[in-house]
Amino acid sequence: MAKQVRFDRTGGPEVLRIVEVEVPEPAAGEVRIAVKAIGLNRAESMYRSGSYIIDPVFPARLGSEAAGVIEAVGPGVTGLAPGDRVAVIPAFSYHDYGMYGDVVLAPARAVAKLPEGLGWTDAAAVWMAYGTAWGALIDTAGLREGETVLIPAASSSVGLAAIQVANAIGATPVALTRTTAKAGLLHEAGATHVIVTGEADLAAEVRRITGGAGARVVFDPVGGPAFAQLAAVTAERGMLIVYGALDGRATPLPVGDVLGRSLTVRGYLIYEATHDDAKLAAARAFVLDGLASGTLRPRIDRVFPFDAIADAHRHLEGNAQVGKIVVTV
């Protein structure tokens, strides 16, 4: 019997429970994986608490990222075999698959072989972060060399990935953080500039950095009332990409800025890329090349054992992390 995480009602981390389940042989297009590490994502705590864009179906499973060894492959699966070291790419609904377990099924199209030398913990921290950053910044916004991107909540795993992706193409990443506590870490992580929004004048700093032009791209997981300040510092014909709602309060649409400077406000989820075969292939190539060259390097905040999954969720919701939270199995 395998061990997997389930929950029967929405609520705090305490609703998570570890149960024993029988994992069947993989069906056509599936693989079965012996999991070594699981990557945690903010969407999972939102789904567990009932505040995500889809509602749980009980008993509900969780998890979209894992790394491990293929145990078996289903009919029609090519290019993957038992014994392969792999990571799972978020490319499916929580209603269909869940990666919180020691043995799981996954769709073969959402599985990538690991580069040589990439450990289990790092492997579980790759695809949500870099897939989201690539899809939003490169595929959607068309960020180019020499352009500036503002990155609120930059100490998150996706924020740090965005810094690295921007640097990889020669763009200028500007990290935003509320206090000085994480400023040094963000500089070390590769941010060209760090703006401490709780102390500095955001508009003045962005004008200084961009020579008055504003940022061509804003990559925001926060939303809320501060969104208007981001729109005010976005360049003419620039794009604000919203990929989360950490603030929880209503996000106003600053119509004056949007109309006056022809701004684009765009929602983004990784599934835009991972549900499209051509985009998924392009994302894989970019991320795997970056891992091989060292330009992309996951940062791990903290590692928890599998039986402490509730504690891992509490840490995730504490908003103190810098990088990815990983659970080892």
Image: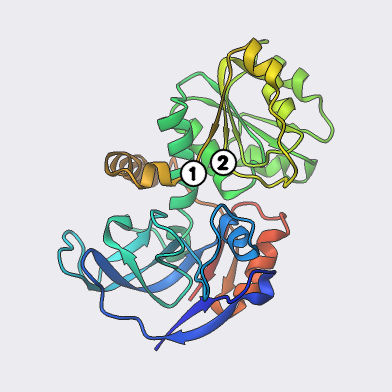
Compared with 52, 302 (above or below) is below
Q: Residues within 10 Å of mark 1 (few under 14, many from 20)?
A: some
Q: Residue at x 50, y 48 (%)?
A: 129
Real-space Cα separation, disc 2 to disc 1, in angstroms:
6 Å
57 relative to 35 in the view: left or right? right
Q: Amino acid at mark 2?
A: Tyr
Give the number of the disc on residue 269.
1
Quadrant (top left, top right, bottom left, bottom right) of the N terminus: bottom left
Decide: is 211 above or below 238. Answer: above
Can you name the residue that lies furthest to the right here? 199
Who is closer to the viewer here, 292 or 29?
29
| Cβ atoms at labels 2 and 1 below 8 Å apart | yes
Residue 294 location, x and y as percent? 42, 44
Q: How many marks?
A: 2
Q: How is the protein colored in the picture?
A: rainbow
**Residue 212 placed where, x, y %?**
68, 10
Secondary structure beneath label 1: loop
Q: Is residue 166 left or right of residue 12?
A: left
Name the amino acid, label 1.
Answer: Leu
Splitting the image into 4 quarters, where does residue 131 fall?
A: top left
Residue 163 appears in the figure:
yes
Image coordinates for residue 288, horizontal then vertical, percent: 34, 46
Identify the residue shown where x is 63% and y is 61%. 50
Residue at image coords 76%, 34%: 225
State the image quarter where residue 273 is shown.
top left
Question: Which quarter of the figure has residue 16?
Answer: bottom right
Q: Nearer the viewer, residue 197 or 23?
A: 23
**Does 34 sit above or below residue 281?**
below
Q: Which mark is residue 243?
A: 2
